[in-house]
Image: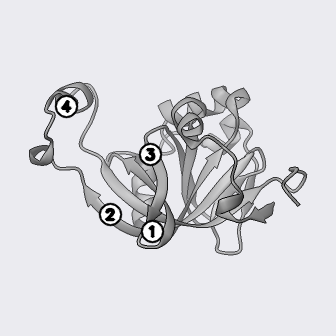
Amino acid sequence: MKEIRVNELTDNLFEAISKEWMLVTAGTKEKFNTMTANWGGTGFLWNRPVAFIFIRPERYTFDFIEQNDYLTLSFLGEEHKEVHKICGSKSGRDMDKVKATGLSPLFTENGSITFEQARLTFECKKLYADLIKPENFIDNSITDRWYGESHGGFHKMYVVEIVNVLLPSFANTHE
């Protein structure tokens, strides 16, 4: 993989996150898990490029995120929707998602996990986390729509620093 600076990104991240989706991956070379997510965003906070993601504590990936300082956000492109469907609907507790999807793990110098199929990866370091609290909602229609028995528990929000932006080695960038 090839590293670029965050200010060299040309992606529309609103589109990438909401429509293309991303894989959130955490763990170690020996044991990791990945899941599909499409809630999150990017920005500039505390003088750092950051991303923010939301993970429900009941998700298997949650424990991997909690136990590790780094995680990745990998964008595979819309042609990999089947991978996202599996990684978003099946639990790593019950199956080997890498084997089931044909993903090929790659490991960064920091020990983070991304995938050969990724067209773009953010390697991130956790900075801040907090549970979403029902009493803090101003618009209660959100809690009715997205939380409860049929949806799951309240998410934990993570603010993570984007420490590396990785592209496939063959990617054409502004050089």
Tell me the number on the disc at residue 148.
4
Q: Quadrant of the N terminus?
A: bottom right
The residue carrying mark 2 is 129
- Residue 125: image x %, image y %? 51, 69
Q: CA distance from mark 3 to mark 1?
A: 14 Å
Mark closest to the chain's N terminus, 3 or 1:
3
Looking at the image, how many numbered discs can be counted on the residues? 4
Under mark 4, the amino acid is: Gly
Q: Quadrant of the C terminus?
A: bottom right
Residue nearer the viewer, 173 or 81: 173
User: Dot 4 lies on which element?
Assistant: loop
Pointer 2 and pointer 1: residues touching (CB < 8 Å)?
yes
Mark closest to the chain's N terminus, 2 or 4:
2
Pointer 2 and pointer 4: residues touching (CB < 8 Å)?
no
Mark closest to the chain's N terminus, 4 or 1:
1
Residue at the extreme left of the image, as rendered? 135
Q: Is residue 110 left or right of residue 64?
A: right
- Residue 35: image x %, image y %? 52, 43
Label 4: few (<14), some (14–19) or many (≥20) C-alpha neighbours in 10 Å: few
Q: Is residue 27 left or right of residue 64?
A: right
